[in-house]
Amino acid sequence: MTQHETWVALRAHWQELADLGGIGALLGWDQSTYLPGAAGSGRARQRALLAGVRHARATDAGYGRLLDAAGALDLGPTEVRMLAVARREFERATRLPGEFVRASAQHAGESYAAWVEARPANDWARMVPLLERTLDLSVQRAGYFPEFADPMDFFVDASDEGMTAAQVDAVFAELRAALVPLVDAVAAAPAPRMDFLAREYLIATQLRLGEEVGALYGYDFARGRQDLTAHPFMTRLGARDVRITTRAQPNDPTDALYSTLHEVGHALYEQGVAEDLLDTPLGGGVSAGVHESQSRLWENLVGRSRAFWAGQFGRFRDAFPEQLNDVTEEEMFRAVNVVRRSLIRTDADELTYNLHVITRYELERQLLGGSLAISDLADAWHAAYEANLGLRAPSHVDGVLQDVHWFSGGIGGVFQGYTLGNVLSAQFYAAAQAANPDLDGDIARGEFGRLHGWLREHVYAPGRTFTPNELVERATGQSMTAAPYLAYLRGKYTDLYGLS
């Protein structure tokens, strides 16, 4: 086989793997949006079948020979990285037996279908045996990689290549030490006016407003769409099919707005990957932390800024004239930045959010380490929330059952990315501001092109061409640091709440 033929064959195989992944994402998207309630077990079986087919293709011996042959080719730096990522994924996939992959996929589907019914019914007992099985599968998965002495190291590295659990622990310790006293100070200050958020807001109008702002941000609805779900997410179904979901409440228009803007941030990343990288091993976001940095940047640093509401308050007041006729722009800005200890992670404000994440991460470490049993998890959850946030959930609905993650996949390596994303969001935004003075002026005018353009060039377009650490250093000039994030939070909330 010539060099050209070898590379063409590799690209064809990568396209096939991408298409199989897209079909799997489509089944998952449908299950979370439109699947009939009685169809959950059948969908779990379909997803398990597809996972088995994709795993067989991802570990095919002929594919391995192609990767070996490509190692001798004269390649450019992008192709070298492409091959390195493909080789890493191939070697990891071949560690996992096909039956294990199929069983994990089927269990995930069955567990998710049960959770959809169990959560609103507050039926924790129903989920205990399923979650015990999830934990067993998670520990078993990590066990196929004995070079990771700590199972959490395996899961962290899988989500954020090159990072260890010890590094995550250090970041979390720094954040906890800085945020707890700031939360205490803000909580003691007078709360802003919020009564108007509890008025009746037509959901269809809420969804339209979110889509309008998402389009202003740069989300291309010709290559995506928005639908309702219980737990919002973004998913890539194909090279030019990047979809978002949101949720809405009639008595809080900010829930739909910020759910949409969060997922738009993820989608901007996926839609911004360079065309020549699509359907290759480099054709997506580089890590969970970098991906989350974009959802949090567009949701919080932009969407909760004073400049944003200077530019968009009129749009919202025109859409809801009766509900907002006695509300000022400043009152809206303060209301969407209220700080209050709460039970629900996805409803949490910027200051307390990381305490929710740290709670979950520490519980995962205990579960994976064997010091906490699933049967004791609900009690451990309550104890952790009382310690970290001074609250206790009245039921499991707002306690251990609230997040979908453990009930739709595995335990370990997911939650830490949310806080790493918060840290990186401020670091990327500070770099974008340094390169583009007066971004606040742009945002106040409803112009997001300069910010989007800088992020597309420095974060989105490279896809996985660089490692996460390399990407951060190239874009910002330094390794990941919490300093810009803590400076942003202290500056914003000291001003908002008049702290000394």
Image: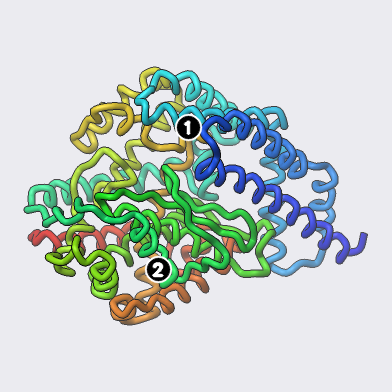
Q: Quadrant of residue 337?
A: bottom left
How much space separates mark 1 and mark 2, taking CA atoms?
33 Å
- Residue marked by disc 2: 212
Q: Is residue 308 visible?
A: no
- Give the residue drawn at x 10%, y 53%: 191
Image x and y of residue 69, in percent:
84, 55
Nearer the observer, 370 or 72: 370
Q: Amino acid at mark 2?
A: Glu
Query: Which is nearer the eye, 10 or 477?
Result: 10
Seen in the picture, residue 450 relative to 203 is either above or below; the reply is below
Against 148, residue 137 (above or below) is above
- Which mark, by number, is residue 407? 1
Q: Is residue 253 above or below residue 461?
A: above
Q: Secondary structure at mark 1?
A: helix
Is residue 52 left or right of 106 when viewed as pictured?
Answer: right
Tell me the SS state at disc 2: helix
| Residue 272 badge | none
Residue 200: in sight, yes or no? yes
Image quadrant in which the C terminus is located? bottom left
Quadrant of the image containing the N terminus: bottom right
